[in-house]
Amino acid sequence: MKKQVCASVFLLVCVLSLVTLSVEAGTCNLSGKIRGKKPPPGQCNRENDSDCCKQGKLYNIYRCSPQVTSRTKATLTLNSFEKNGDGGAPSECDNQYHSDDTPVVALSTGWYNKGSRCLNYINIFGNGRTVKAKVVDECDSTMGCDSDHDYQPPCANNIVDASKAVWKALGVPESDWGGLDIYWSDA
């Protein structure tokens, strides 16, 4: 009888472990933190209300993003992909700058997936509308607070960083640009 109870408990523990592992496989946990550095004078572009790193502050980093589905929940943020814009360097996918009048986006590191979505389109659903935008850059979730990232903190793991054209196409009033709950999918 004692052996049966032990076997039953062992089996229950195994089943619970498998269920826990399968649930966790769809999650994305914090990968670590980086310490902020104060930007040199005039080196952090505040366009579009961009944040600048603060000396000594700890910022979360992620090497993954939530699982992509046909309706992936995300936060839409505002970015300029133009030269001298708050996006900093040219876009990762094509080493080019892009007009604010073109619907382009940068995706958090996990969704950017080492460039596998480069120059492909995604559909963005928000504010009761849909817009198609081209992926041209990574919104780096693993690094920040340096010249390559315009002295801005790392992106969260659920960001679609979009040009003004995307915000306009979604019909969001300019006074509300900056952060919007959206869904997106590969086009």
Image: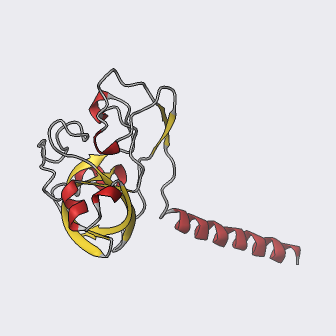
Figure colour scheme: secondary structure
Q: Is residue 125 above or below residue 133?
A: below
Residue 76 x/y as whole percent: 34, 58
Residue at (22% x, 46% y) in the render: 80
Q: Is residue 144 left or right of residue 134?
A: right
Residue at (33% x, 74% y) in the render: 70
Q: Is residue 83 left or right of residue 54?
A: left
Query: Quick one: 173 or 10, which is closer to the camera?
Result: 173
Residue 44 x/y as whole percent: 31, 31
Q: Is residue 70 left or right of residue 157?
A: left
Q: Is residue 165 visible?
A: yes
Residue at (29% x, 24% y) in the render: 42
State which quadrant residue 75 falls in: bottom left
Q: Is residue 70 above or below residue 53?
A: below
**Residue lying furthest top:** 41
Query: Quick one: 115 or 86, which is closer to the camera?
Result: 86
Query: Quick one: 142 or 133, which is closer to the camera?
Result: 133
Q: Quadrant of the N terminus?
A: bottom right
Residue 148 x/y as whole percent: 27, 32
**Residue lying furthest right:** 1
Residue at (22% x, 54% y) in the render: 163
Q: Is residue 187 visible?
A: no
> How many marks can you see?
0
Q: Is residue 76 left or right of residue 96?
A: right
Q: Quadrant of the C terminus?
A: bottom left
State which quadrant residue 153 falls in: top left
